[in-house]
Image: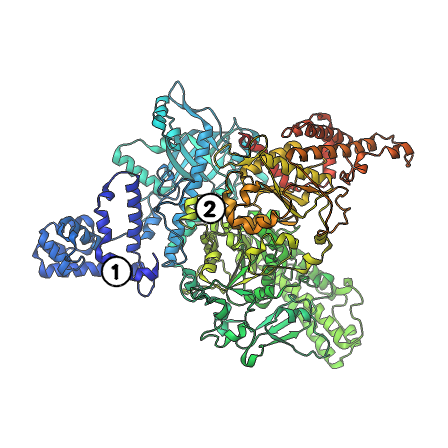
Amino acid sequence: SQLPTRRFVHTLLEDRALLVKCKLSGLYRHQGQEASLFRQLLDLFQFYMGFPIDDHTGEPQAEDEVSSQHYEKVCQLQRLAFKHWPQLKELALSNCGTVEKRDALRRHLSALSEDELRFLVTRQLRLVAEDDPWAQHKSFLQEVMMYTYERRRFQREVINEMPLYPTEGILWDENQIPSVNYTGEGCLALPKLNLQFLTAHDYLLRNFNLFRLEATYEIREDIADVLQRVGAYYDEDDKVRFAGWARMALPLTSCKITEVRKPNVGENKPAAVTADVVVNTKPLRGDVRGEWDDIKQHDVMFLLTIRPPAAAEVAQMYAEGAEPGVREKYGLVAVRGCEVIEVRDEGGKLMNDFTGRVKREQWMPPEGFVRTYTVALDTAQYQLDMNYMARNKSEDVYSTFNLLMRRKPKENNFKAVLESIRDLMNEEVIIPQWLHDIFLGYGDPGAAHYTGMEASQRLQVVDFKDTFLDADHVVESFPHYQVKFAEGADGSKPVPPFKVTFPESGPTPLAAAMTAHSRSDGSSVAADMGSGSKAEGRGQEANGSGAGGEKPVLTVESYTPPDPGPYPQDQPRRNNVRFTPVQVEAVTAGVQPGLTMVVGPPGTGKTDTAVQIINVLYHNCPSQRTLLITHSNQALNDLFQKIMEREVPARYLLRLGMGEQELDTEQDFSRVGRVNAMLARRLELLAEVEKMARQFGVSEDVAYSCETAAHFWLLHVFSRWEKFTALVERARTSAAVAELFPFKEYFADAPQPLFAGKTYEQDMERARGCFRHLRTMFQELEECRAFELLKGQADRVNYLMTKQAKVVAMTCTHAALKRREFVDLAFKYDNLLMEEAAQILEIETFIPMLLQRQEDNVSRLKRVVLIGDHHQLPPVVKNMAFQKYSHLDQSLFTRFIRLGTPYVELNAQGRARPTLAKLYNWRYRALGDLPYVLNTPAFKAANPGLAFDYQFINVPDFMGKGESEPTPYFYQNLGEAEYVVSLFCFMRLMGYPAHRISILTTYNGQKHLIRDVIEKRCANNPLFGRPYKIATVDKYQGQQNDFILLSLVRSRVVGHLRDVRRLVVAMSRARLGLYVFGRQALFANCYELQPTFRQLLGRPTKLALVKGESFGQCSRGVDDKVQHDLIEGVEAMADLVGRIAQEQLAAAHQQYSAPQLEAPTAPAEQQQGKPAAQKEPAAAAPKDDVAPAAVAAADAAAAATKDGEMAEAGAAAQAAPEAKEEAEEAAAAQEQPPAQPKEAGKKAGGRRGRGKK
């Protein structure tokens, strides 16, 4: 399956007939798991032996070419038989379609004796060597002939006939889907994602199979969880009943096939199979019933047949210490997938309709509890089942289903992605010519970089707009050039914006920014990527010198942008980020055609760089369209919000997908929202046209439509402007400009005076600015004209997406799900920018490159910009076998880097204190700090109440144990959870805002445990509240907060933190403070983690606290040494928090118990009796007041904490029901976390039982 070795090995294997020998071996015919694995491996081997590719040129062979070669080979056999073998006369005279069949070949060859057959195979056809011992067996010779001349099915045909939903057979096939405890020993019948691929079809096929199997593994885990929960049993009537319940499954009331359509022409499976599935949601809780009611069209569900085994059968399974599988243990008989077409309530009324059949004003709440789901079954699987039933006289599996299972929507999109991959396999995949070789893993790794592109394709002059803040910034950004500013007319110092003219040889990359993996000889791709025939002599320039040792000259021109108009809103918004030279190199490379790779370590401004690339690209190539892709909705929204703040008109921006509603903006950037905005803008502009017509004395009917407004522009506006410019050109005075300007009345509401009257040039430029404002206005009206002509909302939405929008943003998942829709709508784009590229699966990176139909076998794609960090976590793959054996977690970004593709590595971080950055910057080549983190007071100040800005806190066994595992792979550590929550409470008592604290952990079990403790002890207590987020390290990648409390959980083995990429993510989330809780003896001895833990363990491993400080009232510097107290352990920390809480509550009691009419000045004795919170420096009270009822509730919580009721402290806070409402009001007055933590808390509550098991 690798082209360099295939060229030689393939011929040898064919000559030795290895495949045929394996098929005739005893192991192949043997029954058992090992033999099954051998057969599956042999199928994989057979596929690659006959793969359609020219072994010498590497060119893929089309199906027509393969067929013609096959039939030519059959015809040669027939000619040979006709000439030399009378016994094979029937074979010689038969048609090729008959000869190529296996049974027909066997029948014809049986007419030859063993010696005759050996002579034919070894001497005439030379398929096997004469001295091969196997040549003495007739069965072997026949098998060689049949293997050589039978027609093999194309893999495309096999894929098209393959069911997309998994069945019970493949779900528990350990050879294809190994268990989670895969050790890496032995081989598996799985394809691998290596560095190289034979063809694009080979690439798609491997990804299709692995993606399908990974989805199948996740479905298997969900089914196993449901089977464990529902508790199936037989009642007295021998009917299957369910003693338990599962949130994701319901017993079936009925399941009936309603329609089986006739096959399409040329197919042997039904065109469609639909069924009605009925369930009753009455026994469910309201929130769970709502989830079932929210099921909509295209959601995937699974139909299960369960027949629980009898008690005797179960005992037999456990005999002799055997552990039965999930399928046998719970009696799972059949699994079939289906896709929802529509949902109806008990009254037959349509629910969740997005097709327009139910109008919004006609919507009504659903009736009753019975729900009927009309579902589409897999037609290929249905045909297989019917064939099997007819052949074996078995029961109809579709009449046996008794359980319906659903899955979480975010995890249930596998079918649409598989369909997208299958569609690509049925098309001719056109990869851009400049990207093709490097994509398949061959050729020069630097060929796709802009330095390797044709000079005619590169941009020699680039308008960098607001990238540079001043002239010095330009000089700093191009240290490898001799920057020469073009002299202005007045000789003044150049000011932004700047246009940069590169040398005729093209832009030269900054040597300090460019990086690539070393070759085997030690040389770097980046060092000599400029050398070669296309850019001769560039190698010297890359090192900073040209001919004669001089730097190449870079011509920079400062220009005054045209006045956009007299109104403040006309002025463009400017960039205020001072980009580093490496970031400028990334922007330069991103604007140029070709492949640009940007590695962004944590906090180095990847998002700002991406936004600037889009901004500069839009202004340099305004006619081109850019597709923006990220892995997560949050990253996409962050990126999109920054683009909205730049000089890209909002009417050209479009955000697709479900995360659009999370955008922090008043504008709606969804498809429907943009259409509505265009229609609303049309009305605003037509009102302006009507106002202008009234001032000109023209009939107001010109503002009736965009078309009439266009005529008004030509006849009245543009004509007046031409007349004005002709008259002013003669006079050339500022007075003439002010007097003759024809639109003075229209611009009467602009800031006055409209014309300063100082010079003719200034006033004329202001007049041109006013005209540009009008021209932009009528240009917008012309763009609105299509929305005026198209009457249907769907047509308007499609026009917006395919024609109007210049920057279209979506997640990689949305692109994979909707590819067929994009292609059908003739969606076009020229540039692709992908952020979080190192977190995206290979296939989910590749599909966005092919969302458009290729024209004339040429790809329209001109630029691909991939931004990510391969030193952080890779794509999530749950099955260890697919991750370790098949490398499914390898992203395209990482593969390109491993191939040696040149990339720009950003080298200055602006997120964390320099001391915190040292915990992870050893993983990068030369990661420094921006002046912002060195000079800003917030980064220089110490964390109040805490002696250090980062610290590792050793947590010994708590209550006699460390880590626990209530369910498999659900790790928890109660001691660390208690310690982390206690420190959070302490920080809140010191006055730290809750939204600036996040709690992270390395395992889901610990996350749920910490949420439980927070919910019980802190959530309803106004002194504490909830932190901003409680999440796993993996889920928090790409996010940050000021203070991070990290729990490492494990106390026996290091676990998956041994992966350095996870360590980098964990260490790089904090800006100001990082506090790590773990077992010192375990992590100190882990070799992979040494560079970080050597620094962590250089400080005390007991929590160090400082008295006399509170948040906002601390003057200590972060490097200042201070006397501190060391906390001995979990109990001591809880006791301290309880004492401080009591002291602060005592102060609050005194404040609220004072008489309301008392004089402002307190008596002296009350001054002497100040609460201990003011006497004890460590007990600084929060700034916000606490309501009396909240004080009472929190007082009880503090007492419980002090008494050592560690996990049940929150129960006391809920002991006063009458205080609940006032406590909530007080909590709302404090700095509480945003909505996300509240939702997270609810989810934690739903799984609390599992966490405590």
Which quarter of the picture shows residue 992? Answer: top right
Query: Mark 2 = which residue?
Result: 877
Query: Which residue corresponds to the image point at 49% horizontal and 47% vertical from the top-left?
Result: 876
Q: Determine the CA span between mark 1 and mark 2.
A: 36 Å
Disc nearer the start of the sequence (1/2): 1
| Figure check: 1213 above or below 493 | above
Residue 931: x percent and y percent? 68, 60
Q: Tell me if mark 1 has few (under 14), some (14-19) or many (20+) residues whose alpha carbon lies within 10 angstroms of its own.
A: few
The residue sitting at 31% across, 65% down in the picture is: 56
Tell me, for residue 115, which label it has, or none. Answer: none
**Element type where label 1 sits in the image:** helix
Where residue 853 sits in the image (x, y, percent)? 44, 59
Q: How is the image coloured?
A: rainbow
Which residue is denoted by mark 1 in the rendering? 11
| Residue type for callout 2 | Val
Q: Is residue 739 visible?
A: yes
Quadrant including the N terminus: bottom left
Query: Secondary structure under badge 2?
Result: loop
Foreground of the two, 1201 or 353: 1201
> Left or right: where does residue 156 sit relative to residue 580?
left
Residue at the (54%, 62%) spot, across then down:
625
List x then y, in percent, for residue 1248.
Answer: 57, 32
Q: Are marks 1 and 2 in contact (CB under 8 Å)?
A: no
Whole-percent x and y of residue 117? Answer: 12, 54
> Closer to the camera, 487 or 851?
487
